Image: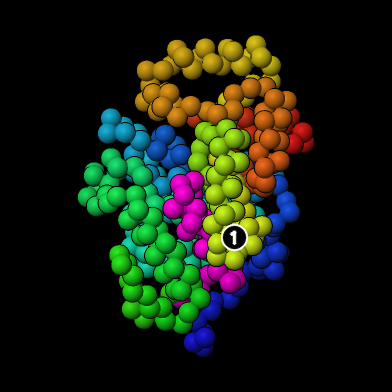
Amino acid sequence: MVEGSKSKLPRNYNTLKDKVLPMTELDFGIQIEPQFGFTYERIREIALEAERMGFESIWLSDHFFLTKESIGTDCLECWTTLAALARDTTTLRLGPMVSAQSYRNPGLLANIAASLDHISGGRLYFGIGAGWKVVEYEAYGYPFPKPATRIRQLEETIEIAKRMWTQEKATFKGRHYSVEEALCYPHPVQEPHIPVWVGGSGTLTLKVAAKHADAVNFAWSQPPSFFEERLGVLRRHCSKIGRDYDEIRKSAGLMITMEETEEKLESELEDQRRKKDTLYRRYLSRQPPNVVDTPEAVAKRMGEYVALGIDHFILRFNFGEEIQKMELFMDKVRKRI
């Protein structure tokens, strides 16, 4: 290590480092979609309430806009917003779910992540995916190659990041990306590196996860049967390369519509039907919540995922109702799972 390359560790580092990827706990995070029109003040409020209530993490999607019709709708940039949250929170884990590998040069992205790990005192999760939202690629002028190519780019991005986080000088020459004696100081606080969370459930993506990930977050809006089959794919990939399947955390992303009683739930669903003309509601109609029920039923459904081996949930509640539903979840659902 080059002398003086490591900055002074944060005061709470010894406490935080013991929280990295606990393998036996059931954790819950909150997903925020800046593309829905959140202000930073609202995101900050949700994060602070999540921290107070005992949620483990907060996650931001990495998008530039919701649709081409979203003129005037705020969409705060993911990594900039995470940096602000890192200073406004103290114990909450944070990360992108997921950062599209195509949107930033891999070396730069690794450097951004290392800096943010220091700003947060070692609380960053490196959520990374192949990228999928073609309308954003076209709007911002990024090439949008075939899925197999983007997944290979994903793997190269992870390889570059890990080298830059752990080596004095990182060199990597891939088919798509490369770095040459690249420096990245300070190295991340977390050792041996920032935990890598791969987002996705395709067979090729899970092959990458088996080789490189500390955790996998599977696709949104899918039933337990889907997870059972996909977990089997991940297990087989791990077996082929001799990796312990249990080393990898398995996370489920769930979109939840929940009310205390069936009467209130029906009223909420009717309200959603009346508002279907808004951009958010139209988006929701294409990707509806996969858990719609009362707290007792939500807990039972989530227990089915836990029985399959899911040990982390990333929860997304209806836009504008996040804090209310977070409180309801912690009060009525968490203790029943």
Q: Tell me: 102 left or right of 234.
A: left
Q: Tell me: 32 left or right of 298.
A: left
Residue beneath disc 1: 239
Q: Is residue 20 magenta?
A: no
Quarter where residue 262 is shown: top right
92 to 320, vertically: above or below: below
Query: In the rendered image, which quarter contains the C terminus?
Result: top right
Q: How is the image coloured?
A: rainbow
Q: Which residues are magenta?
A: 185-212
269 to 240, vertically: above or below: above
Q: Tell me: 7 left or right of 264.
A: left
**Residue 137 or 175: which is nearer the viewer?**
175
Instruction: List x then y, in percent, for residue 236.
Output: 57, 54
Instruction: List x then y, in percent, for residue 286.
Output: 41, 27
Identity of the amino acid at label 1? Ser
Instruction: List x then y, in percent, for residue 166.
Output: 51, 76
Q: Looking at the image, which residue is at 44% across and 64% down? A: 158
